[in-house]
Image (cartoon, helix red, strand yellow):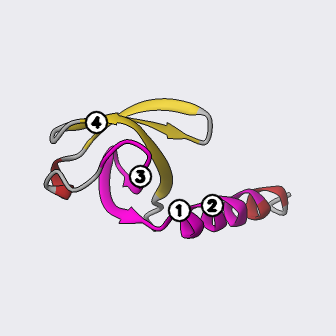
Amino acid sequence: MCVGIPARIEECDEISAIVDLTGTRREISMMMLDGEAKPGDWVLVHAGYAVTLLDPDEAQETLRLMVEMANHAD
């Protein structure tokens, strides 16, 4: 099973970006998005790559659901 995590772009160029992944800053590849993202946008990150742009509301709801699932995993 593959899991993608929503992340907000803090800074980016066409090759890489610094994103906020639930409070942790990470560098990811932007090469799959062909320069269509900008700081403030939300992306779905999988295996170190931004794979698609996300609607901000969808990103927040996904993060909320992930936290809820983690809290019920015990």
Q: Please state if 24 lies on the left or on the right of 70 as rendered.
A: left
Query: How far is disc 2 from disc 4 in space, using C-alphas?
Result: 21 Å
* Residue at position x 64%, y 58% in the image: 63
In the picture of the structure, the residue carrying the numbered disc 3 is 41
In the picture of the structure, the residue carrying the numbered disc 4 is 12
Any magenta on residue 42?
yes
Query: How far is disc 1 from disc 3 in space, using C-alphas?
Result: 7 Å
Mark 1 or mark 4, which is nearer the start of the sequence?
Answer: 4
Mark 4 or mark 2, which is nearer the start of the sequence?
Answer: 4
Instruction: Tell me, for residue 60, which label it has, or none.
Output: 2
Mark 1 nearby-residue class (10 Å; few <14, some 14–19, many ≥20): some
Mark 3 or mark 1, which is nearer the start of the sequence?
Answer: 3
| Callouts 3 and 4 close, C-beta under 8 Å | no
Quadrant of the frame with the C terminus: bottom right
Span of residues in magenta: 38-67
x then y, percent, for residue 67: 74, 56
Q: Amino acid at mark 3?
A: Asp
Query: How far is disc 3 from disc 4 in space, using C-alphas?
Result: 10 Å
In the picture of the structure, the residue carrying the numbered disc 1 is 56
Q: Amino acid at mark 2?
A: Gln
Nearer the observer, disc 2 or disc 3?
3
* Residue at position x 35%, y 49% in the image: 47
| Callouts 2 and 3 close, C-beta under 8 Å | no
Mark 3 nearby-residue class (10 Å; few <14, some 14–19, many ≥20): some
